[in-house]
Image (cartoon, helix red, strand yellow):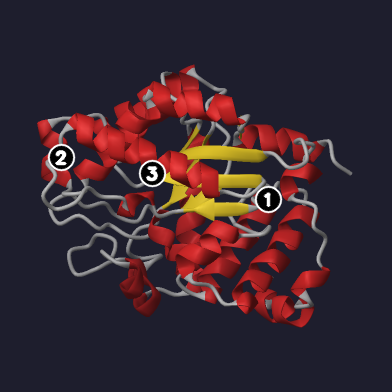
Amino acid sequence: MKYLFLFVFCLLGNIGSMAQETYAEKLGYPKGKKVIIFHIDDAGMSYEANQGTILAMEKGVANSASVMMPCGWVPAYMKYLQQHPNTDAGVHLTLTSEWKGYRWFPLSGRDKVPGLHDKEGAMWSNVASVVKNASADEVETEIRAQIARFRQFGVEPSHIDSHMGTLFGSPAFTERYVKVGIQEKIPVMFPAGHATLISKERNSPAQEIQQFQQIGKMLWNAGLPVLDDLFADTYGWKLAANVPNTEENLRKMKTEKYIELLKEAKPGITMVIMHCAAPSDNFKEITDSWPTRYGDFWAMLDPALKTFIEKEGIILTTWREMRERRAKVK
């Protein structure tokens, strides 16, 4: 795995010659269907994040989540998972601590991962600082520690993904992310099919998409399910400056945005990333991102979104179902 990306570059071929079959079809989903994972990041970050995640999945259309293992409300959410073992929940591999007044720290300790600590002793607040100061060995040590802590609660993660996309911040970090997933036999969030939405979101050159697709082949050949596409910009959906952040306004705006996104999505498995928080005055003290997190929460509960999904024949899936399907494919 040390030379993963050299290997990838050597394998690059003509993108047009690649099989047109989607990973959804490979897993046995109907041809031409849109298959969606509505995924909630940041479970374990706070009480409100836990409640928003639980309610959006139990009462709404959200169907997957991942947990920030260094955060203070992790035990409460993990106890929920112990009581609800079929919940689709993975490890939200966390290498940054972005809020000013609420910080968290590497599980591995300063002696093992000094490059992951900022001057306050917490994780760095942004991806660039992690890339600048941390080695790939330190990153691997920490992500393994977070996976181990998840498993210490007696729950097997449905997948792994990356908080703030830090593990995509450098090729060396991505290499370790993929390596750990393969070695631990945990599905890895990676958009490696047609990658239409993520390509548009990132303004990706063709070569980057080819790299994604080659890594996807590697994951598939290791016996893991693979995404066709990914959308990670719901965080950027905001009301106009002159429109108040009321429940009605946020719900309506977010629901409309999700419906537009579903219309734009291509056939195949698309993971849609969001952040749900149950409203509280306390949560507003943690982050000024509360409007988008409340909006996601209300949208997931909106009957209009569920009606649209059913009307369009969109299939909702989870990482656990994908993993089960992959195990049956030779």
Instruction: Specify the quadrant of the image occupied by residue 135.
Output: bottom left
Residue in front for this viewpoint, 58 or 1: 58
Name the quarter where the C terminus is drawn.
top right
**Image position of 105 with respect to 311: above or below:** below
Hey, what amino acid is under mark 1? Val
Residue in front for this viewpoint, 280 or 235: 235
Q: Earlier in the sequence, mark 2 or mark 3?
A: 2
Pointer 2 with pointer 3, Cβ within 8 A: no
Residue at x 62%, y 61% (from the top left corner): 178
Q: Which mark lies nearer to you, 2 or 3?
A: 3
Hey, what amino acid is under mark 3? Lys
Residue linked to disc 2: 245
Locate residue 129 relative to residue 137 in the image: left or right.
left
**Image position of 103 with respect to 275: above or below:** below
Residue 226: image tag: 1
Q: Which mark lies nearer to you, 2 or 1?
A: 2
Residue 257: image tag: 3
